[in-house]
Image: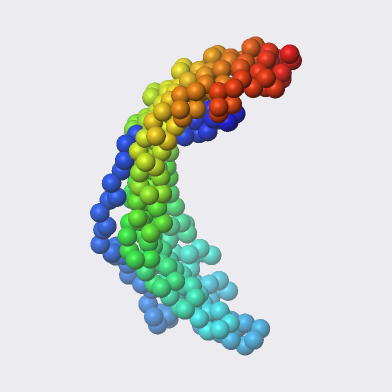
Amino acid sequence: MNPALICLSLALSALSSSAAVQQEEPAPTPPPFEAPPEVIPELDAGVFTRFYHESGALAREGYLVDGVRTGVWKAWDESGARVYVGAFRDYRRVGPWILYGKGARATSQGYYDDRGLRHGAWAIYGGRGDLRLVAHYDHGVRVGVHERFTRGGLLVERTLYKAGLKDGPSIKKSTGAKSLVEKGVWSSGKRVGPWSFYHEDGALKRAGTFKGGLEEGEWVSYFPNGKRESIGRFEAGRAVGIWTGYHKQGERRFVATFVGGIQEGPYTEWGRSGQLIAQGDYKAGTYEGPWKFWSAEGQLDTTRSGRYSKGALIQ
């Protein structure tokens, strides 16, 4: 395999040990919500008005005050299914609102402040009426806990927000909440501290530390069988120093050197049986100087071996 491709995949992967699937949690409970009234309250100086679709089906109804929608309004699509119910003031949505999808089931509900911005808890529902997401807002800005759920009510994601940015512990699970996908801590929208990422089957895939949203320090990646795939260090998100890669059963595969995220210096690659596959030096990410390549049977590949300059074989 081309050493450059090996090291490219190395820089994009890396982490440690296996992860246990978290216990399933009970179905979520929707946040408290006081729905708009079913009967539209009469407004002083208001004119009750209805609008219709071209087909003649009722589209919207509510009160106009000086020609402006005011108070609670309801809307339907051409089939007669509900679209929304909620109040208007000064051309803005205010107070409790319910938005509907197919089958006249609520798809989201929550509150708007006096400026028409989401405020407080908002709930998002699936097509079967099951709670799929709970988010919290402070006058239009995401705050507090954000939780997503499967159709069956199992937790898929839990993240904390502060001033609209992810801030605090976070976990994500796979579709169906069968296994972890990632877990760690956010600070002002950036990953910080220890983080772990997982394969689809829940086995640990990559683990290490972030600083200011960038990888920092030692990172290790793993195969699904739990064996190490690679190990090395990052500085400000760039691979540095000596990196070592392994075959799936733990045999050493390569040793490479990085400077500022670019491969620089000696490189050696071995096959699963320990035979040499490639040996030479990199400069600015390309072959430079004498290189030797061997076949799987240990025979020198004379068509590829020789002296390189800027990645090109010159003799």
Please, is residue 139 above or below residue 167 in the view?
below
Quadrant location of the N terminus?
top right
Kindly identify the residue that appears in the image at 47 percent across and 34 percent down.
Answer: 13
Name the spot of residue 9 as percent of width and height, x first: 52, 33
In the rendered image, is residue 233 in sight? yes
Residue 37 found in image quarter: bottom left
Question: For the view shown, which residue lies furthest in the right direction?
Answer: 314
Q: Nearer the viewer, residue 232 or 128?
A: 232
Residue 267 lies, with reference to residue 36, above or below; the image says above
Placement of 176 over or under 55, stated as above or below: above
How is the rendered protein coloured? rainbow
Residue sitting nearer the eye, 266 or 64? 266
Q: Is residue 307 left or right of residue 3?
A: right
**Residue in view at x 41 percent, y 28 percent:** 251
Rendering coords of residue 92 (x, y %): 50, 63
The vertical placement of 176 against 293, above or below, is: below
Instruction: Report the number of discs.
Output: 0
Q: Position of residue 70 (x, y in %)?
A: 49, 72
Residue reaching furthest bottom? 56
What residue sits 42% from the left and 61% below the top? 112
Q: Nearer the viewer, residue 272 or 44?
A: 272
Q: Position of residue 277 (x, y in %)?
A: 55, 23
Looking at the image, can residue 284 be seen?
no
| Closer to the camera in the image, 254 or 119 | 254
Residue at point 46%, 17% (across, down): 241
Q: Quadrant of the C terminus?
A: top right
Where, by quadrant of the figure, is residue 27 drawn? bottom left
